[in-house]
Image (cartoon, rainbow, N blue to C red):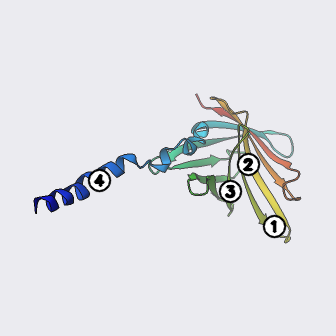
Amino acid sequence: MIKIFVTLFVLTVLVPGVVAQTTQNPCESESSKEFDFWLGNWDLEWKSAGGTVQKGTNEITKILGGCVVRESFDGGKDMPLRGQSYSMFDSVSGKWKQTWVDNQGSYLDFTGGLEDGKMVLSRSFTNRAGKPMMQRMVFFNISKDSIEWNWENSVDGGKTWNLVWHIRYARRK
């Protein structure tokens, strides 16, 4: 009887504690920290189609126990675009996934990850004219206090990319 009690005690009390200590939280993996360079408050600058300099802001935080990177974009006084994205590293697929929503009615979903020191997230879709298209975001020239970001599209399956929008990020002091 004592042997049964000791066995039950070990199985119900000690073993779960050992298993819990050896199981890593996927939100604390090195891969889940690859987007940490983006965290913070940023002042943004870009040129409009007419060539005038426009300014906005972006606030990037981690939420939900550090599992999700939340972006809050504000296009400023010159651009009415306001939006948010939610990004997380999917440990099953080994890819970053991002969902963007905004006040213009957009819903965009991206996947990707680090490629040669750049964070690249892309998506494929069919445009309103019924033609296949691709879009991607490329974060590059990443440093502690600045980032460059390109919004690009492709109509040839990603063989060539066209620059649509370039933003310079400067960390707010």
Q: Name the residue: 67% across, 60% down.
A: 109
Q: Are marks 3 and 2 in contact (CB under 8 Å)?
A: yes
Give the mark, 3 or 4, whose residue is nearer the N terminus: 4
Give the mark, 3 or 1, whose residue is nearer the N terminus: 3
Mark toward the viewer: 4 or 1: 4
Question: Picture coordinates of residue 134 (x, y %)?
Answer: 80, 58
Q: Amino acid at mark 2?
A: Met
Q: Are marks 3 and 4 in contact (CB under 8 Å)?
A: no
Q: Name the residue: 89% across, 58% down.
A: 156
Give the mark, 3 or 2, whose residue is nearer the N terminus: 3
Mark toward the viewer: 3 or 4: 4
Q: Are marks 3 and 1 in contact (CB under 8 Å)?
A: no
Question: What kind of element bears circle 3?
Answer: strand
> In the rendered image, which residue does mark 2 sit on?
137
Mark toward the viewer: 3 or 1: 3
> In the rendered image, which residue does mark 4 sit on?
15
Visible residue check, residue 121: yes
> In the rendered image, which residue does mark 3 sit on?
110
Q: CA distance from mark 1 to mark 2?
A: 18 Å
Give the mark, 1 or 2, whose residue is nearer the N terminus: 1
Which residue is nearer to you in this view: 74 or 30?
30
Question: Picture coordinates of residue 1 (x, y %)?
Answer: 10, 63
Which of the labelled discs sits on residue 73, or is there none?
none
> In the rendered image, which residue does mark 1 sit on?
127
Q: Are marks 1 and 2 in contact (CB under 8 Å)?
A: no
Task: Give the quarter of the figure containing the C terminus.
Answer: top right
